[in-house]
């Protein structure tokens, strides 16, 4: 896959996250509810190590509720706390403090036994670009507290934002990078709007989306565009149909597929197509099995 982060950029992001991690008791790891593993930095475990962590599945208002349930179970089965949230409406937000207190209960009780005075739980928000970090910090703070676009070279005193019930947040989120080794991961990120339009051709992204929707959410395509897709539908034919129904034409009456692609992607990102998740835990199981085989092979 031709999308690369500059190694220097990654190293810097990593150093910044490591520095911030030292200052907190726990981490809120933000994953996009529609593509939790594709929007997850694969080095996160190594970075966060044993620090208590809650996964917040963001933009759950846009995700397929059944898929979100499956993902919640998936993470819980791996002993990770998980909470779906919708930052725009505030759904799930109130539970964040309760879950955090529960997670930190033992540590804080131990500290008290050792005579350390009770203080607020310190937490930080961590996630890839566009996953909803600033929106969450602002929502929790009840104001525009999150500094957007942390410019390098601008030093300011670090701020803790009290977000109620014995919890405080670092005002700047930890920004991680997604990983694009797998073509599908890059395409899912592009569909969600997490990576810039110029990185992957918009038509390729829309064709990937249409093929996926035809296989899993055919009825939504039917409702929105009056298409009658099957799992075998040719995605290009679907895109052409959307284009002609939506009047995506160039001068001279030629179909404008790029415009049609933009229509589909805009409709998906705004939720107009319906609630769609771009991956399920089972989509990753086969990969994991293959990896397990490979690493077994390494041992022998
Ligand atoms: N529908 C929906 N959009 C959200 C939600 N949270 C954030 N967004 C949108 O996602 C985009 C990126 O959010 P932002 O907080 O800037 O992401 P950051 O790069 O991680 O800080 C913005 O347009 C937000 O309005 C959510 O829960 N639901
Ligand atoms: Mg931000």
Image (cartoon, rainbow, N blue to C red):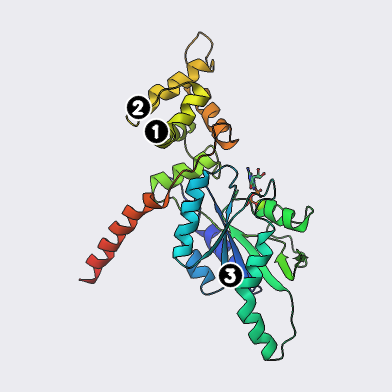
Q: Is 101 or 52 nearer to us in this picture?
A: 101
| Disc number lying in front (3 or 1) | 1
Query: Where does the C terminus fall, quadrant-wise?
Result: bottom left
Q: Is residue 108 above or below residue 222?
A: below
Tell me which label, 3 or 1, sits earlier in the chain.
3
The answer to whether residue 183 is left or right of residue 266 is left
Residue 233 is marked as 2
Give me the residue at 25% from left, 67% from top: 296
Residue 18 is marked as 3
Tell me if I can see residue 14 in this picture. yes
| Callouts 2 and 1 close, C-beta under 8 Å | yes
Q: Is 156 or 172 nearer to us in this picture?
A: 172
Residue ranking furthest to the right: 143
The answer to whether residue 66 is left or right of residue 90 is left
Q: CA distance from mark 2 to mark 1?
A: 7 Å
Q: How many marks?
A: 3
The residue carrying pointer 2 sits among few (fewer than 14), some (14 to 19) or many (20 or more) residues within 10 Å by Cα, namely some
| Disc number lying in front (3 or 2) | 2
The residue carrying pointer 1 sits among few (fewer than 14), some (14 to 19) or many (20 or more) residues within 10 Å by Cα, namely many
Give me the residue at 34% from left, 32% from top: 231
Residue ranking furthest to the top: 252
Q: Name the secondary structure under disc 1.
A: helix
Q: Name the secondary structure under disc 2.
A: loop
Q: CA distance from mark 3 to mark 1?
A: 39 Å
Tell me if I can see residue 256 in this picture. no
| Ligand 1 neighbours mark 3 (CB distance < 8 Å) | no
Tell me which label, 3 or 2, sits earlier in the chain.
3
Tell me which label, 2 or 1, sits earlier in the chain.
1
Q: Quadrant of residue 232?
A: top left
Q: Which residue is mark 1?
A: 211
Residue 160 in the image, given as x and y percentages of width and height: 75, 67
| Callouts 3 and 2 close, C-beta under 8 Å | no
């Amino acid at each position: 896959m031709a999308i690369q982060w500059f190694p220097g950029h990654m190293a810097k992001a990593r150093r910044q996250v490591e520095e911030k991690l030292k200052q907190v008791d726990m981490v809120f790891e933000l994953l996009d509810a529609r593509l939790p593993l594709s929007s997850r930095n694969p080095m996160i475990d190594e970075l966060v190590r044993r620090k208590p962590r809650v996964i917040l599945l963001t933009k759950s208002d846009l995700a397929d509720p059944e898929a979100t349930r499956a993902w919640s179970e998936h993470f819980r089965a791996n002993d990770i706390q998980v909470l779906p949230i919708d930052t725009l409406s505030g759904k799930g937000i109130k539970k964040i403090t309760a879950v955090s207190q529960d997670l930190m209960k033992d540590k804080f009780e131990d500290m008290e036994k050792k005579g350390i005075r009770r203080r607020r739980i310190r937490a930080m928000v961590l996630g890839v670009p566009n996953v909803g970090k600033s929106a969450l910090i602002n929502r929790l703070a009840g104001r525009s507290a999150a500094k957007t676009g942390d410019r390098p070279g601008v030093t300011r005193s670090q701020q803790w934002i009290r977000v109620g019930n014995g919890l405080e947040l670092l005002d700047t989120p930890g920004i991680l990078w997604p990983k694009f080794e797998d073509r599908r991961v890059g395409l899912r990120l592009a569909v969600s709007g997490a990576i810039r339009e110029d990185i992957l051709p918009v038509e390729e992204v829309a064709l990937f989306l249409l093929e996926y929707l035809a296989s899993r959410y055919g009825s939504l395509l039917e409702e929105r565009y009056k298409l009658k897709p099957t799992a075998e539908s040719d995605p290009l034919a679907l895109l052409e149909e959307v284009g002609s129904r939506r009047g995506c034409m160039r001068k001279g009456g030629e179909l404008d597929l790029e415009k049609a692609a933009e229509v589909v992607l805009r409709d998906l990102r705004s939720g107009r197509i319906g609630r769609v998740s771009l991956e399920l835990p089972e989509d990753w199981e086969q990969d994991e099995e293959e990896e397990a085989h490979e690493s077994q092979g390494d041992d022998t």
